[in-house]
């Protein structure tokens, strides 16, 4: 039986992290579209990794539970990389909340019961979670600790309150980092760690959809006026993921790592004044 690293979302970021933490382990690549997982698996297999694939719908408890059973059938789950999600230009508010908010909470809960001692996980959140205005302490606690199957029933997450896809995305990504903080306590009881990474614009197919979509001009402005002045590569996110999942990150859990090239810093204190970038269009609740 092998140590198993589960990668949910077979895109560029998930692959980049997996390449850094999965040598000598079995990689289980899962995606909503199994053909995406199969394509990524070929790339990793050609690079010397042991890989298998599965289909998963993170918004379905039965589907996520089946993935857990597949993973534990392969060996001890020592790593979880959750990089699945949809962007504001790709989906409705309801779908974003179902996939990005509920789906992440569901994945964390299901894998909490099987993650091995010494294991570690990373959830890919977003800089957008940092662009959302302050929520009340009650709302923060609700996002972090509401039982998974009750999460989408929160009154302030209902369709008449969250009417904009960007706002749904902001709320989901804020919820991801808060949820991980709470889950770190539970994971710690099993001797495991879990953190979030909140990347800025990373050049992936999803980012290209945003850059060419209705908010593209605003996103290009973010890149141009950020301190770094460029977008990130998946490999740069992979480097941070490797730190968080490896021995050098052994004292880090329940944390969120913002890596956005300084966009948030410039938004608060620099040239990206409030109201000039797309994240300002959403409301807090």
Image: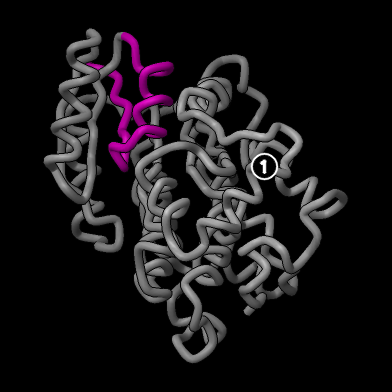
Question: Residue 12: x percent and y percent?
Answer: 36, 33
Query: Along the line of sight, which residue is nearer the eye, 232 or 189?
Result: 232
Classify 10 Å Cα crowding around label 1: few (below 14), some (14-19), many (20 and above). Answer: some
Magenta span of residues: 1-23
Q: In this view, does 130 lie above or below 44?
A: below
**Quarter of the rendering occupied by the N terminus:** top left
Q: In which quarter of the image is residue 251?
A: top right
Quadrant of the frame with the C terminus: bottom right
Q: What element carries label 1?
A: helix
Relative to 282, does residue 241 appear above or below in the rendering? above
Image point 40% across, 35% down: which residue? 81
Residue position marked by numbered label 1 in the rendering: 224
On screen, 280 above or below 34?
below
> Residue 203 occupies which quadrant of the picture?
top left
Q: In the displayed structure, does residue 154 sit left or right of residue 9?
A: right
Does residue 255 show up?
no
């Amino acid at each position: 039986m092998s140590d198993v690293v589960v990668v949910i979302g077979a895109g560029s970021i998930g692959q980049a992290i997996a390449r850094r933490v999965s040598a000598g382990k079995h990689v289980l690549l899962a995606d909503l579209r199994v053909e995406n997982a199969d394509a990524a698996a070929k790339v990793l297999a050609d690079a010397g990794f042991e890989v298998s694939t599965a289909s998963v719908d993170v918004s379905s408890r039965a589907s996520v539970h089946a993935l857990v059973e597949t993973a534990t059938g392969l060996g001890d789950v020592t790593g979880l990389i959750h990089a699945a999600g949809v962007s504001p230009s790709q989906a409705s508010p309801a779908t974003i909340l179902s996939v990005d908010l509920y789906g992440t909470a569901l994945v964390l809960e299901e894998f909490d019961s099987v993650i091995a001692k010494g294991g570690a996980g990373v959830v890919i959140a977003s800089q957008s979670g940092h662009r959302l205005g302050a929520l009340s302490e009650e709302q923060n606690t609700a996002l972090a600790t509401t039982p998974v199957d009750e999460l989408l029933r929160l009154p302030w997450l209902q369709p008449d309150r969250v009417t904009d896809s960007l706002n749904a995305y902001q709320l989901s990504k804020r919820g991801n980092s808060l949820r991980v903080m709470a889950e770190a306590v539970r994971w710690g009881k099993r001797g495991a760690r879990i953190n979030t990474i909140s990347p800025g614009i990373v050049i992936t197919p999803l980012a290209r959809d945003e850059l060419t979509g209705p908010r593209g001009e605003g996103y290009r402005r973010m890149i141009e006026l950020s301190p770094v002045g460029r977008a990130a590569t998946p490999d740069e996110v992979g480097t941070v993921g490797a730190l968080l999942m490896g021995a050098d990150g052994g004292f880090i859990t329940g944390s969120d790592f913002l890596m956005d090239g300084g966009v948030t810093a410039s938004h608060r204190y620099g040239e990206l004044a409030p109201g000039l970038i797309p994240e300002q269009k959403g409301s807090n609740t």
